[in-house]
Image (spheres, helix red, strand yellow):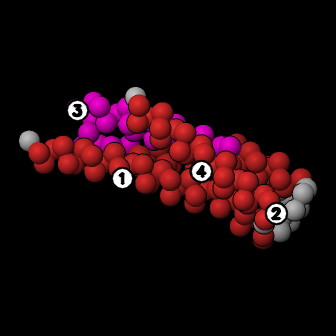
């Protein structure tokens, strides 16, 4: 539980810092800022829930060997939800500048990096505890 809370704060902290840097230095004010804010919120909340969920599942002995597959399934669900929730701005009739579309990849990849870091720590901890026995 203690690790879950720490992971949660680190993930949300990284998201807040990344959002601040992204909007302060690389983005002008405009309607895209609201969409980008929702994108950051979605990715980092989902990442936090995903990591906490995998940490919870890692305590169930029968699921330990399936955590990697559970993570991949959750990642695909996260991507599918993103497309479903944000399909109107993503697939709008008017042409969106490429710089704005590329800006949407930044929160995805940062959240993905943070997820992979914490999931790898969880899996390595499980692997280490299995080798000790």
- Magenta segment, principal secondary structure? helix
The N terminus lies in quadrant: top left
Among the two numbered marks 1 and 2 on one chain, the one whose residue lies closer to the N terminus: 2
Q: Within 10 angstroms of label 4, few (less than 14), some, or many (20 or more) residues?
A: some
Mark number displayed over residue 27: 2
2 or 4: mark nearer the eye = 4
Stretch of the chain drawn in magenta: 41-70
Q: Secondary structure at mark 1?
A: helix
Residue 5 left/right relative to 15: left
Mark number displayed over residue 14: 4
Among the two numbered marks 3 and 4 on one chain, the one whose residue lies closer to the N terminus: 4
How far apart, in angstroms, are the residues tagged by discs 3 and 2?
46 Å
How far apart, in angstroms, are the residues tagged by discs 3 and 4?
31 Å
Q: Is residue 77 visible?
A: no
Q: Residue furthest left?
A: 133
Q: Which residue is mark 1?
A: 120
Q: Secondary structure at mark 3?
A: helix
Quadrant assignment, res 28:
bottom right
How far across and how far down the image is residue 90, in percent?
75, 55
Asked if labels 4 and 2 touch by Cβ distance under 8 angstroms, the answer is no
How far apart, in angstroms, are the residues tagged by discs 1 and 2?
32 Å
Q: Please tell me whether residue 104 is drawn above or below residue 130 in the rendered image.
A: below
How far across and how far down the image is residue 129, in percent?
18, 43
């Amino acid at each position: 539980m203690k690790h879950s809370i720490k992971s949660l704060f680190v993930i949300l902290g990284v998201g807040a810092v990344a959002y601040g840097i992204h909007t302060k230095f690389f983005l002008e004010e405009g309607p895209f800022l609201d969409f980008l804010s929702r994108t950051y919120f979605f990715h980092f909340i989902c990442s936090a829930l995903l990591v906490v969920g995998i940490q919870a599942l890692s305590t169930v002995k029968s699921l330990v060997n399936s955590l990697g597959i559970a993570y991949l399934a959750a990642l695909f669900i996260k991507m599918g939800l993103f497309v479903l929730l944000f399909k109107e701005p993503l697939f709008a009739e008017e042409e969106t500048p490429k710089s704005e579309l590329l800006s949407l990849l930044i929160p995805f990849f940062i959240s993905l990096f943070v997820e992979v870091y914490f999931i790898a720590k969880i899996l390595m901890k499980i692997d280490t505890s299995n080798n000790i026995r």
